[in-house]
Image (cartoon, coloured by chain):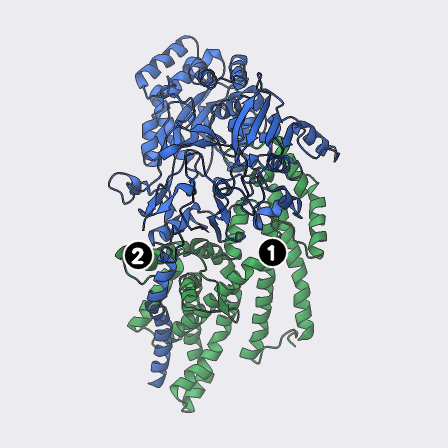
Amino acid sequence: MGSKKVLGGVVALVLSMGLVASACSSGDDGGSSSGTTAAAGAGGEVVDLATFVAGPPDNIDPALTTELGGAQITTAMFDGLTEFAYPDGAEKGELKGLVAESWEGNADATEWTFKVRDGLKFSNGDPVLPSSFKAGWDRAANPELAAGYGYLFDIVQGKAEWDEAAEKEDSSVTGLSGVTANDEAMTLTVKLAKPYADFPSVVSHIIFSPVPAKVVEGLKDQSDWDRGEMVGNGPFALAAPRSESEIVLVPNKNWTGDVVGTTKVSLGKITFRVSKDENAAFSSFQAGEGQTGAIPSGQYSLVQPGGAYENTNTVKPQLGSYHFLFGMQEGSPVAGEKNLKLRQAISLAVDREQINKAVYEGSRQTSTGVTPPGIPGFEKGLCKYCAFNLDEAKKLYAEWEAEGGSLPGPLKIQFNEGSGHEDVVAIMQANLKELGIETEQDGRSDETYFDEMSDGGCILCRAGWFWDYPIYDNGMFDLFSKAAIGPGSNNLGQFSSDEFDGVVDTARSNLDAAAREQQFRSAEDIVLNQDTVVVPINWYQGDQVFDAKLQNYRQEPLGWVRWEQVSLKK
Amino acid sequence: MGAYVTRRVLLLIPTVVGAVTLLFVLFFVMPGDPAQLIAGGGDRAVPESVRDQIKARYGLDRPIPEQYVAYWGRVATGDLGESFSSREPVTEIIARTAPASARLAFWAVVVEALVGISVGVYSAVRKYSFLDTFVTVGTAAMGAVPVFVLGYLLQQAFGVFPATQGWSFRLPVQGIGPNEWVLGVFPASFEQFTYLLLPAVVLASVSTAVVARMTRATMLEVEKADFLRTARAKGLRRRTVVVRHGVRNALIPVVTLIGVDIGALVGSAILTETVFNWPGMGSKLAEATAGRDLPVMLGLTLVIILVYAVTSLLVDLSYSWFDPRVRLGEEPA
């Protein structure tokens, strides 16, 4: 008798522990999760659950950041010479001076002089001077730091020499010889290795941020800065050194304004919480533990008409293109002038709407070219072979066959496995079968895919591209020029055209923006229409939802949120 | 006994060396260029020059045997290297993540032992009753549900559902909360306890089911033993028979199971910590593996092997307490 009671009691006690616990938790738990507004400072406190859904960022240091999440923090903490302005969520950006008051290039676009604004300060009170930029650039371009985006300095005079010296373990070079700072005149003069009219746009990239020279000189290890008290000149500053589980930003009291007229930060505090799993992070958002969330794959119905976040999402085009490239290297069955009609027929036969609906739940925008809408100079409908037209495709295909064209075997479509590209390729296979082309899936390991493709393995291969800065050149020169051919480079299809390179080179040294954009468009016309070496599929879009209390919350085309413009409705 | 412990500790050396060697070989046999990942590669190619600089920084350009020897040289001086991706010293990563994992594992073992053993004993004592059948079916189901599925379900049930209903009561679904503890493992506040509850239950789930089933089985076996019949014949109270004679004898295999399970918990912890965003070694190991972060993988593996070895030694030592007939380190005559 007694034993039953005792044992039953133990079981009951243990099992009920949980229930008792949760029942009692009601009071303080509500306070900890949704209490973010209660204890708010001036403009309220926000918890972000959208930026880091798969682990903490490796870096938030402007010199070292390579991921979008980390860059979100960096952009909030640092202001560069220039920035692209998207006032009120404008689709197309406009380049504006941020720390730079003005800039000027010489006649052949090989030398640029930036006039730096007077009186700006870092969050620790140190002045922002031309030499702060020189310090930041020399630090980021240092071969010893081995920064992932260090190659962006290749255009600056002195970078090649520095790399060479470092390779020979010669330590006599200690900076970029082409960069000169004059703190009295408040000018930064940059000599380039080659003409580059878009250089003022390139310096909007975070790697060109200024750093407080005194602070970084005192660092024991340069790669350690962003785990301590990193100091910037942007709208926000670190509340404390970042931890593995969160990064907390507070307004930088020394900040004076941005490129769209914001002069004061409204929010009192932003806590970027780091999650390890996108679904769990979204559960956390739904449970009210934060004000922003990243939409997990498979849940896009939430932002479509009738969905819970129909009006509170950031789904708008971003600067990313998803496309397939034709292998144009010798020996590729689709290369050459003689296969032009085949390539055009293939591009016409791909049903991009179907791919967007079936694979992406309509969450992307079907593309009409490689260059996305957020790029200055963008023109809609540039591609003549990007709208699904099976009849026209069949006609071109028949002409190609009549002219003696034939494929040696099933056409291989290559992609990196494990990110849903299989589904896109499957639809393309069905599309091309309609045309009479037999195809074969050729999935490769994610780790070796880009090496194999850039080394001449591409026949019809998937690629994606996120723009580093919103300029036309970044999606032309970096993807289709001869300079971008070779292992580890991004011209996977090894498209090589003197005509294309000539047009891009002229554009790169053309100081007139409108004329330059026109030239880039004709360069894109070559890869899309004249030679048809790319099959654009879609443009990436924003992927966040947010609490209706957040005002002015949007993702800019480059992917990040300008938190200084965001406020919280009481 | 002393000699036995020494021998066991010495046996650790080949275990650790073997595991590290295996990881080293696997890392370099795996396809692809780690420098690509370290540079943040992702969806784009990384220039050769950048990769060369990264390789030089981490010594990845040296021959593999040389890197291997150099690694042991550093480990001997307590230097586990720095993370490829965050460039943080591995010893700091371990110092930060190990306590969180230890706390979660401790409570998982407590849940597993308390719930598992009591349910198992109860089931055995009331065998073939409705509750016993219920427990049998329930534990089978529990053991079959993947840890992360259970995690998502509990998050939805105790975190998201109450929030959508506007209830003031709900459990947090992410993170470790205030991270305040008394005596290392006891939640310092009620809020802290709410953060611990779901992850601990989920981490314990599979093992609890196994422990319950095993306890039931061994209890039923012991019940038939002569010494129990003798105990009953002596006219002892049923509670004394069950607890003093039955449970204590039935527990030997169960204790082994729980001990060995501390190692297995690390496996489940990878999933549990990831789903609940618990800042421990498991989620860090998952992250490091995905990012090909060799120094972090090696460092965490070293710690996990050591923990596993020490607990299994303690389990072996505890046999002699549970069953005085067991003599450690002596060859049977």
Q: Which residue matches tag 2?
A: B163
At which x and y percent is residue A76? 48, 42
Left-right relation of B299 to A51:
right
Q: Is residue A409 above or below residue A467?
A: above
Above/below status of B313 relative to A211: below
Residue at mark 2: chain: B
| Mark 2 neighbour class, 10 Å CA radius: few under 14, some 14 to 19, many 20 or more | many
Are callouts 2 and 1 both on one chain? yes
Toward which corner of the image does residue A330 lie, by quadrant? top right
Look at the image and give the colour of chain A. blue
Q: Look at label 1 and name its amino acid.
A: Glu
Residue for point 51% across, 61% down: B100
User: Residue A9 at x, y = what percent?
Assistant: 35, 78
Residue A239: percent from left, percent from top: 50, 52
* Mark 2 element type: helix
Q: Which chain is green?
A: B
Query: Is residue A463 shown to the viewer in this render?
Result: no
Q: Specify the subunit that label 1 lies on.
A: B
Contact between labelled residues 1 and 2, with CB atoms less than 8 Å apart: no
Residue B50 shows up from this direction: yes
Residue B92 numbered mark, or none:
1
Comparing B13 with B319, the one in front is B13
